[in-house]
Amino acid sequence: MSTREITVLYFAAAATATRLDYERIPIPADGGLPLSSLSQILASRHPNKGLDQILATSQWSVNEEMVDDVSTVVLKGGEEVAVICPVSGG
């Protein structure tokens, strides 16, 4: 089975938790990956790092476009997906 991949970009707390700026995630070529499933996949790749909690409050962008509804996006391969962590400021 051939695979395609996406590039996941990590920033702020997500980068700290994973100790990565980015990683590539394979996607089966015969189907896509719902963006709504990506949090679970990433958390399973980085267990016991608190990434699941970070992702639960994060937003996503795909190819530099913010995603309002993750249930409407299916990744086919080649996309750049960014984890946008909440920021605080004053």
Image: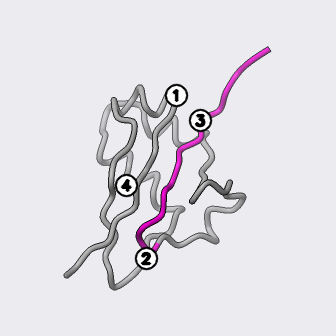
The residues tagged by marks 4 and 3 sit, at their Cα atoms, a distance apart of 17 Å
* Quarter of the figure with the N terminus: bottom left
Q: Which mark is residue 12?
A: 1
- The residue identified by callout 2 is 32
Residue 69, picture quadrant: bottom right
SS type, badge 2: loop
Q: Residue at x 40, y 61 (%)?
A: 6
SS type, badge 1: helix
Q: Nearer the viewer, mark 2 or mark 4?
A: 2
- The residue identified by callout 4 is 41
The first of marks 4 and 1 along the sequence is 1
- The residue identified by callout 3 is 85
The first of marks 2 and 3 along the sequence is 2
Question: Which amino acid lies under the numbered mark 2 shown in the image of this protein?
Answer: Gly
Question: Which amino acid lies under the numbered mark 4 shown in the image of this protein?
Answer: Ile
Counting from the top left corner in percent of width and height, residue 51 is at 43, 36
Residue 67 within the magenta-colored segment of the rendering: no
Specify start and end residues of the magenta stretch as a single range: 76-90
